[in-house]
Amino acid sequence: MGAVQADEVQVAVAANFTAPMQKIAVAFEKDTGHKAVLSFGATGKFYAQIRNGAPFGVLLAADDETPARLLKEGMGVAGSAFTYAVGQLVLWSSQTGVVDGKAAVLNELASGQRSGKMALADPKLAPYGAAAMQVMNKLGLTSRLRPHWVTGENMGQTFQFVKTGNATLGFVALSQVLVDGKISTGSAWVVPAHLHDPIRQDAVLLKTAQTNPAAQALWQYLRTDAARAVIRAHGYQF
């Protein structure tokens, strides 16, 4: 596609999906000529910004509820929401030997046997934070772990808390710690799916961009084999 025909779309992307979307955006521009301008952050904040007129054309949320709400409120194109990825939650420490395969460290923190901070994303803004809350509730540890919490505004900030050592461990997205299909550093517990609701991440085309060729093209591109290969390589399911 020639440069004359190229268009641009502003895309709001859930922070947990940063790495795969950066790669997808490069391939998208190469394959279509269109450009995706990416903003990363918390789904809850993007919802508020869209309600207030932010010029996004596509939202890649960290849940399925926010796109559904935007459709119900008339801000999304009817029938355009679809699940582009299903996320996986992981309890991760940048240090080796902290987190084992049964997450005994959570009990150690809760009982006072271990000191340190535990990071999670704001459950009111970030679906991965809400999933972390469900895990702690099911394990019966929420009230005893609460004094150890350090709360990130989104998954990017939450990951940084753990990566820099400001938190000993934290609940992050598997995609944030996966390199070439393996958890690259530190120690981790991939949270069993039965401990929280599925993290279905939906995309929705927003009405402000329903006539924007780049927005239409990106909406379609996310379901191509090329995009899905990147998504799968970063630890997401469908």
Image: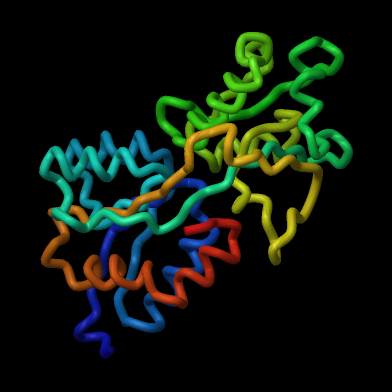
Q: Which residue occupies the foreground of this view, 166 or 122?
A: 122
Residue at x-position 84% and y-position 34%: 98
Q: Which colour assignment does the render follow?
A: rainbow
Q: Position of residue 45 (x, y in %)?
A: 34, 35
Q: Position of residue 156 (x, y in %)?
A: 55, 42
Q: Which residue occupies the foreground of this view, 129 or 194?
A: 194
Q: Is residue 72 above or below residue 108?
A: below
Give the residue at the far bottom of this rendering: 2
Q: How many marks?
A: 0
Quarter of the figure that contains the N terminus: bottom left
Q: Which residue occupies the foreground of this view, 191 or 214?
A: 191
Residue at x-position 73% and y-position 32%: 169
Write down the quadrant of residue 35 in the picture. Answer: bottom left
Q: Is residue 219 above or below residue 160?
A: below
Q: Position of residue 205 (x, y in %)?
A: 22, 57
Residue 12 is left or right of residue 55, and the answer is: right
Give the residue at the far front of this rendering: 194
Residue at x-position 38% and y-position 83%: 31
Q: Which residue occupies the foreground of this view, 223 or 179?
A: 223
Q: Position of residue 190 (x, y in %)?
A: 69, 43
Q: Is residue 159 above or below residue 110?
A: below
Residue at x-position 34% and y-position 44%: 64
Residue 68 is left or right of residue 222, and the answer is: left
Residue 51 is left or right of residue 25, and the answer is: left
